[in-house]
Image: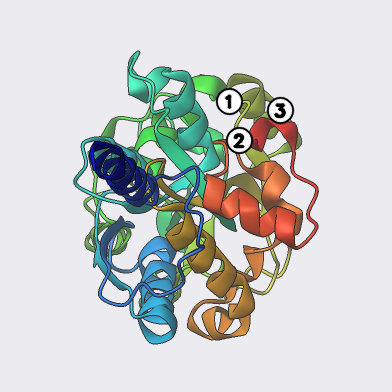
Amino acid sequence: MKRTISVIMAIVMMVILVGCGSNSAESTGANKTDFKGTRLAMGTSSVSSTYYILGTGWAELMKNKLGVEVSIEATPGGITNMQSMKSGDMDLGLTTCWLAGQGMDGTNWANGTKYDTIRTMFPTHSSVMYIFTLASSGINTIQDVEGKRVACGAAGSTSGDAAPLVFDALGIKPASYTGLSSTATCDALKDGTVDVGIGVTGIPASWLLDLETAKDIKIIPLSDEDLKKILADQPYWAAGKIPGGTYKNHADDIPCIAYWNEAICNADMDADLVYTMVKTTFENLETLKQVDKNAAGIDVANLDTMVMPLHPGALRYYEEIGVKIPDKLK
């Protein structure tokens, strides 16, 4: 009798242990696929940004295809998103690879705190830095911003943190920096309370298209020498271009700074859930492209631009479809 009870107890303990292990990010055994009713919070950026638009479209896709409810939060941007994820206030977020790299290393904005419990799900798009003004301003080059009033994103946003670094690398000293949303920056330019706006988003920028319906604008190009100096200071940044014809009176390509972006999640998120969300994302890219054409950047070919290691669930999907995974992401 005692032997029988011991066997039963052992079986019960095994069942309990298996059950507890099924929530692990590393292994879920049965590959769960039904996540209806799951609720998650995702940090994006300001309401008019590519992050917000693309994030909202992605959340709708997760709801329609999986029954997963993703609450989209408008935030200052990538830094705030990672901070909120680390504190447990958010499950998902969007950020630039630049800010992700610094967070992973614990440098610059991270101020010694390593954001090493965050993982990559998939690349999203390449954002560009717009340095823009009104055509009537008399500002034609980046050097002309010396002594001028600059509006950029709030602290914690890509543009808010990047703008001073651009001018520092070039030895340029604006008169002031004002942290505003992209839409508010455009309004300030129209009102004459700032001279230059800086925003980081995809192509085209909805807020810039709105501005050029009311005012003639000028997007300031960066010279090869400018780019060389800036990129020497910021290795996680890249050179990019805004295609000619995207905006009125800008027929030629405009050289600029570019930043790759990534969708991220907390490392302890259920591996089956992440696998299913990543799989669903790639199987429905055409739907996302209808929401925002920047979704074209969600491509396995862009995995090598990512910085933070892949979540085990995402890694499983990429290995399943035969993608060669860069060592830095394993």
Q: Are marks 2 and 3 in contact (CB under 8 Å)?
A: no
Helix or strand or loop: what does disc 1 sit on? Answer: loop
Q: Which residue is mark 1?
A: 234
Q: Is residue 285 above or below residue 168?
A: below
Q: Left or right of 22: which side holds 309?
A: right
Q: Amino acid at mark 2?
A: Trp
Residue at 48%, 41% (x, y): give it: 119
Does residue 192 appear in the picture of this structure? Answer: yes
Q: CA distance from mark 2 to mark 3?
A: 11 Å
Q: Amino acid at mark 3?
A: Lys
Crowding around mark 1 (Cα neighbors within 10 Å: few <14, some 14 to 19, many 20+) is some
Residue 299, disc: none
Residue 276, image x and y in percent? 51, 67
Instruction: Give the mark, 2 or 3, whose residue is nearer the N terminus.
Output: 3
Q: Which residue is mark 2?
A: 237
Residue 53, image x and y in percent? 39, 72
Helix or strand or loop: what does disc 3 sit on? Answer: helix
Which quadrant does the N terminus fall into? top left
Q: Which residue is mark 3?
A: 228
Q: Is residue 142 above or below residue 245?
A: above
Which quadrant does the C terminus fall into? top right
Residue at 70%, 65% (x, y): give it: 243
